[in-house]
Amino acid sequence: MSDRNSKSPEVVLGVLLDGKATSEKIKLQIADEAEAFTKQSGRKPHLVAILVGNDGGSETYVASKMRNCEKVGFKSSLYRYDTSVTEVELLAKIEEINQDDDVDGLIVQLPLPKHIDPEKVTETIDYKKDVDGFHPINLGRMMRNLPCFIPATPYGILLMLQAYQIDTTGKHCVVIGRSNIVGSPMSILMARNANPGNCTVTLTHSKTKDLKAQILKADIIIAAIGRKNFVTADMVKDGAIVIDVGINRETSTQTKSGYKLFGDVDFEHVAPKASYITPVPGGVGLMTIVGLLKNTLASARKEIYF
Ligand code: NAP
């Protein structure tokens, strides 16, 4: 990114927030800590994932989570169900895993088929094993700045900001998107009395009036909308820190996988204006896995709940 330049003297050259390098570095630390845990306890930290159906994106995400568990010395187990699974069957399996002392973390990959209530699923998972951090107890504790499992994607973003020693104090952070898993928790975390945090936060969504004017005020933009290249250069203040959460998949004949990923930010045109920016792929997605692994290790070590 160092060869990028700008005509405006005020523009700070953008630094790429490299999710690959940062996540690999943190995963080495996690692997060391997992090894020490295994030596001491005689068992590996254990993450269980439940996958319903065979949505392409979900398959990829779960496979990557399982692969990364193995990489850092965790045990991982995957339970797969056809979309015909009933809510009762799924909740019964969750209850069974809740009782299993060999399991430290349990995640149910979203989205779920329409006949299964995601709220019921989230609340059935034992909050002490809720390493995705979606359970209301974890969200409530997060809001009060108490020890908890922070949702994996917002946690990954905090770890990225920390890794680059970005001081967020006093900055104006505009979060775009208010989902329960990214936008809403992110807005709470950035406003908390903590570092990263201590921001003045504006949480925006599809009903926000004059969104561009809001985004233009941002020192930090966190985009979690799900629309390819939604944030364009004219919406971004010079020197802003830009975090792109979006993962928008398009079929492509140019890639081996048959699809290509795009972020919510028009990277090509926004990057020259940003002081820091995450790429897609290679940014927040990889840090999300790190957040999940850290939560699972913390659960195994009983750092949060006893
Ligand atoms: P989501 O549930 O899909 O919701 C999208 C949010 O964006 C909603 O709050 C919606 O507003 C808002 N929005 C939609 N159109 C808008 C517009 N024109 N102007 C302003 N706001 C608008 O959100 P999500 O699950 O957080 O996913 C967002 C993106 O992040 C997706 O691309 C997803 O794949 C990606 N993601 C990535 C990771 C990762 O690890 N990198 C993790 C999770 C999600 P309303 O509430 O008003 O409808």
Image: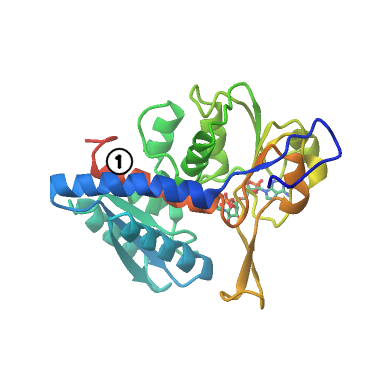
Image location of residue 149, percent across then percent down: 37, 39
Which residue in the rendered view is the most extreme toward the front? 3
Q: Quadrant of residue 277?
A: top right
Across and down, in percent, residue 157 comes to 52, 41
Q: Tell me where residue 301 appears, x and y as whole percent.
A: 23, 40
Q: Is residue 24 left or right of residue 249?
A: left
Q: Is residue 229 depicted above or below 220 in this figure?
A: below
Colour scheme: rainbow
Task: Identify the residue position indicated by label 1 in the image.
Answer: 298
Please report the residue visible at 52 percent of the width from the left and 53 percent of the height from the top.
Answer: 285
Identified at 33% across, 50% down, the residue is 124
Q: Nearer the viewer, residue 67 or 186?
A: 67
Q: Would residue 291 be visible to someone looking at this image?
A: no
Label 1: few (<14), some or many (≥20) within 10 Å? many
Q: Quadrant of residue 247?
A: bottom right
Residue drawn at the location 24% of the way across and 56% of the way down: 97
Q: Amino acid at mark 1?
A: Ala
Q: Is residue 237 above or below residue 110?
A: above
- Total marks shown come to 1
